[in-house]
Image: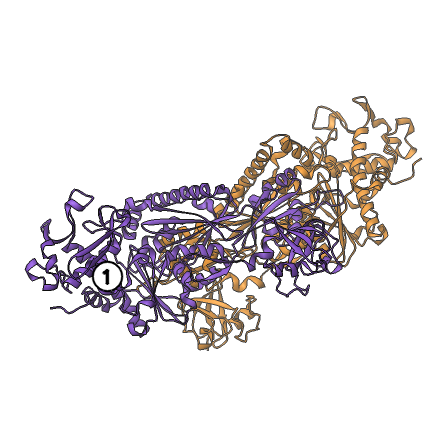
Chain colours: A orange, B purple
């Protein structure tokens, strides 16, 4: 007998079926994963599909699993439906949800696609004198009891009589974690998008995904506009606690930024922002508080207390975020005042809590958040690394953009300097800064205490560099690029003060690592893995970072880059909502070590400012 | 050994205890009912009390049941606490809630006092560098896990840092059915009030109660201001469906009325409306829809469908109802388009669903709602009785106010007429109308077909009344009160058209009763009880109502008045929230019989318009 063509909706693909096989057989053969926990025995009723063309009557066995409305709509069980003639079969999201896996870029985990928001299209028969069920009951019964009448929010209840009749009782229910949050005209199940945001103190990154497929459709990135009120979280909090409208001002800035990015993402994907149903947010505790309109004042005052730790589900309108009004905003949970949802996102996406390997994870941004541990136990701390690696407070510091010196090598004689985009140098970015300091340490131009040598003090191996020692603004400086070769009107230098900034930043991180290792009772020898996250962490050269003492020296193949781990965690929470309770559990379980309260920290910090090597 | 004085808070009563007895023993002896499901074995942990003065350390056994904060606050278990010295003991509401019974006026049921809203005062230690718990976690833990951090609504979360610190971490949590709905400064557990409203088409009645004691504090009653848009629900719905702002207009009228009544009730009790935490609403389906802002258009259009059947819990601000913002509005569930929450309230308060007696219940207002059945099965219908018994459409009809003829007796010769307040007659109210018609039937002035006889047709027994037959507005009329005796400038009459109105009203009700008895398969002989509800039902004379055929003839001692059963049900739902699911179950279970769809109804109606007695 010839094959039968079965068309799969909504993707429109065509499959050739052998007469007599079940739809579940066909799906299995074709790599189309359906939800069938009972393995096709016809007992669980989970492999629900809708035959939109060419339906046969439901078998007696199938009838037990469906309401009269569903049978009228063409519902069948994939495992009971024997294929005999061409048909179109719509696979509802709930039937395939748990067998479609997504791999989020930057994440080490692959999880089943399971967004928080689901859509279900229902078509109900109109009321008659024999069937006078109330509108709300009619909807709930068409939804097969997934929602009870008490679960219809009042604002939806108010619109129900009109929307049901305008659409001839054909509507799409929007469910967020099983709660009814919207009722839309007709069948809108084809439009279901979501976004994930990494809300950094300096940079905001947004991702748009199709929640039906898990596919990433667009990315957008902007500078956090709050930067006009200070580089770091403490100055932002100061702005808030020192004036009554401060919180509202900063919240408005970031919400406006997110709204513009939502618009940009939607345009890039050719959709409407009204088709976006969820926004997940990962940011540090302060960014998390500000965007959700919660006062972060006490985050920055001893004893450093967050207002919110747990993850928050908030109606988008409460924040002024412009997505579908049946949608949700989920802010990932925080751990402590200075370890926020971005760190939870990093742990989640890197799977630190699932690994047996003793791992040190660093997310170096304006603050440095450090996590140490394994499946057994995780501890964390935050260090005020300062924005040196982001280019701030460095004489010629700049972000990693065209013209930034991003790599500096010392070949034993002179320096080789590389700029981004192979443009004329305009400044130095974080990776260049580490490289430059490492090179100057190797050449003996800078000694392990961080002191820049005078030309006559430089040891023989660095003699070729002695002529580059210059005076700049009444301090010693090292000329990386001469005026004639630079993209500026003047030479590009690294000053003594720049070296001190690097020492402070790396010292803070390094001391934090020491405290965590002490708390865990391990030394660097026990470290099985280092994970570097964040835009900066991703471009750093491992060996150079070890040279300046930023990270412990371990075999290079045990150091891994995970890129924007906060963004990856936000995406994971968006696409695989069942992992959210893992994050909530982490936010309670990961122990925060307060460095401020420790008498040993200042000592470790002072020691950690010294670069590795022998002090002459 | 001498007795020890134990002072009970918050009431301040003093009890004499024998040294060595437990507080639970003392409470039992003193009629102070505490919640102790395990009977004092120390295993359930429910008999929680707080020793505010004279505390002893908690025993090891007690320590298992309390958090460190609670122990610090003086929590003890009543059954474990041996009395040895004078002390003050505060009994928190949750510990005595289930042993305080309330008897609601007009209700045949006595239920445990258990309002939906509970208040819990907590005092948390301030944050330190060793205890950096987030504000939300601190609150949740002080609440002993009754609320989780995910259960803090976002608007409360936003205010948390400020309110906790302003009050030195001493706040009162407001819980509605276990959900956190408010956090108040300091200890406000002494202020917890609620109101119940019967929203009638014609009259609105409100009750204010202390939710800590169940005591009724004030009552208020007003004419429903929507009456300017029509006497009955159909004309109100017409107003709504014929103009875009109609629903908003009528909703605003009733909400304004309720707000004024709330203010009046609060003033009468010397409290603030901010201390009112719940409003329960019982009204017919249309009143219920309008006050909650849900379009009732399809209630009045065939096939007569309600938008909402289930009970609704709505935030007061969504309706513009001015009570505490942590409060709740509960609208009782409806049964069908023309049988609403007022009927559910009647069934609930009269306990029809709990009785073995075959009962007919009538709530006669602008519409007549009828319920027939027992514990086994209940059926109901609605009849468009019209507002005749409320004085409308009757030539000299008026409400039951001073000067209304409320009783008419025929002594075999002349009529004896009684007016309310013993004032000069100004009109006739519903009970007077039934009496007058019954008297005229007895005297033969009106024949069983409802025809008013000409003087010469009146049989001998009514001869004395023949001179009272007059012509009025080109129809025959009967003069009840002569112009010289009336409070008006003219005589008070009952016209032929008035008799017809009474026939229509009583015919509709009587036919409805016949249909229900037919559906139930019983006759009047099987009726074990008749329950008359509503202001009108409460003053009717049973035997006279039977004389005109309004209710079936059964022994008079089986006819009971329950007064404002809708109000009683609303109060019951307010004071004994656990009875709400009973109402929800009734709203699903009580079968509605649609009279409009029945071919036999018109026939029964025509028959029922005839008065009992032999047509000559």
Task: Please give left or right for residue B565 compared with residue B144 in the image.
Answer: left
Residue B378: give x, y in percent of width and height: 37, 68
Label 1: state its secondary structure. Answer: helix
Image height check: is B320 above or below B414? above
Among the 4 quarters of the image, the one containing residue A398: top right
Residue A449: give x, y in percent of width and height: 87, 34
Q: Work out whether residue A84 can be spotted.
A: yes
Mark 1 lies on residue: B506
Task: Please give left or right for residue B423 compared with residue A187 in the image.
Answer: left
Residue B462: give x, y in percent of width and height: 12, 61
Q: Work out whether residue A564 can be spotted.
A: no
Quadrant into which the C terminus of chain B falls: bottom left
Name the residue at the right extreme: A616
Quadrant into which the N terminus of chain B falls: bottom right
Q: Closest to the observer: A339 or A46?
A: A339
Q: Residues within 10 Å of mark 1 (few under 14, many from 20)?
A: many
Name the residue at the left extreme: B456
Q: Closest to the observer: A70 or B171?
A: B171
Chain containing the residue with disc 1? B
Identify the residue shown where x is 40% and y is 45%: B258
Identify the residue shown where x is 32% and y is 52%: B297
């Amino acid at each position: 007998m010839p094959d039968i063509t079965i068309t799969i909706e909504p993707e429109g693909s065509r499959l050739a079926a052998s007469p007599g096989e079940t739809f579940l057989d066909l799906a299995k053969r074709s790599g189309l994963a359906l939800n069938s926990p009972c393995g096709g025995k016809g007992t669980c009723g989970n492999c629900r599909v809708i035959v939109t063309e060419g339906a046969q009557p439901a078998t007696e066995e199938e009838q037990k699993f469906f309401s009269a409305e569903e049978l009228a709509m063409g519902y069948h069980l994939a495992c009971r439906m024997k294929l005999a003639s061409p048909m179109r079969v719509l696979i509802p999201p709930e039937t395939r949800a748990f067998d479609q896996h997504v791999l989020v870029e930057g994440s080490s985990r692959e999880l089943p696609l399971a967004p928080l928001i689901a859509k279900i299209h229902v078509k109900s028969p109109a009321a008659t004198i024999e069937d006078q069920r109330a509108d709300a009951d009619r909807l709930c019964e068409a939804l097969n009891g997934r929602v009870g009448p008490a679960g219809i929010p009042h604002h939806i209840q108010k619109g129900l009589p009109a929307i049901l009749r305008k659409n001839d009782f054909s509507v799409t229910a929007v469910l967020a974690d099983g709660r009814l949050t919207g009722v839309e005209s007709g069948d809108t199940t084809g439009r279901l998008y979501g976004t994930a945001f990494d809300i950094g103190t300096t940079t905001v990154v947004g991702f748009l995904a199709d929640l039906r497929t898990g596919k990433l459709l667009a990315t957008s990135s902007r500078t956090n506009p709050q930067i006009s009120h200070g580089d770091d979280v403490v100055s932002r909090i100061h702005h808030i606690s020192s004036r009554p409208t401060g919180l509202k001002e900063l919240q408005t800035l970031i919400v406006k930024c997110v709204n513009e990015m939502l618009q940009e993402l939607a345009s890039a994907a050719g959709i409407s922002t009204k088709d976006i149903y969820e926004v997940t947010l990962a940011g540090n505790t302060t960014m998390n508080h500000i965007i959700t309109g919660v006062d972060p004042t006490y985050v920055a005052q001893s004893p450093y207390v967050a207002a919110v730790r747990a993850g928050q589900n908030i109606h988008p309108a409460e924040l002024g975020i412009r997505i579908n009004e049946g949608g949700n905003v989920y802010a990932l949970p925080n751990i402590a005042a200075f370890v926020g949802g971005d760190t939870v996102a990093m742990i989640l996406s890197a799977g630190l809590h699932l690994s047996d390997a003793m791992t040190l994870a660093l997310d170096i941004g304006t603050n440095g958040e450090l996590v140490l541990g394994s499946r057994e136990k995780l501890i964390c701390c935050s260090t005020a690394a300062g924005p040196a690696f982001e280019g701030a407070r460095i004489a010629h510091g700049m972000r990693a953009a065209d013209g930034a010196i991003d790599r500096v090598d010392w070949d034993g004689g002179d320096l080789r300097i590389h700029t981004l985009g192979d443009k004329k140098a305009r400044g130095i970015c974080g990776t260049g800064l580490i490289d430059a300091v490492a090179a100057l340490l190797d050449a003996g131009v800078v000694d392990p205490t961080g002191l820049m040598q005078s030309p006559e003090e430089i040891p023989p191996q660095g003699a070729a560099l002695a002529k580059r020692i210059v005076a700049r603004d009444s301090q010693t400086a090292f000329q990386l690029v001469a005026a004639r070769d630079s993209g500026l009107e003047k030479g590009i230098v690294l000053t003594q003060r720049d070296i001190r900034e690097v020492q402070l930043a790396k010292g803070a991180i390094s001391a934090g690592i020491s405290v965590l290792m002490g708390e865990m009772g391990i030394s660097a020898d026990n470290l099985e893995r280092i994970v570097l996250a964040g835009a900066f962490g991703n471009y750093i050269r491992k060996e150079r970072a070890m040279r300046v003492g930023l990270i412990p020296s371990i075999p290079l193949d045990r150091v891994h880059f995970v890129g924007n781990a906060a963004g990856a965690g936000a995406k994971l929470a968006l696409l695989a909502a069942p992992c959210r309770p893992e994050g909530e559990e982490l936010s309670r379980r990961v122990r925060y070590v307060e460095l401020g309260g420790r008498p040993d920290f200042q000592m470790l910090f002072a020691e950690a400012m010294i670069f590795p090597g022998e002090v002459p």
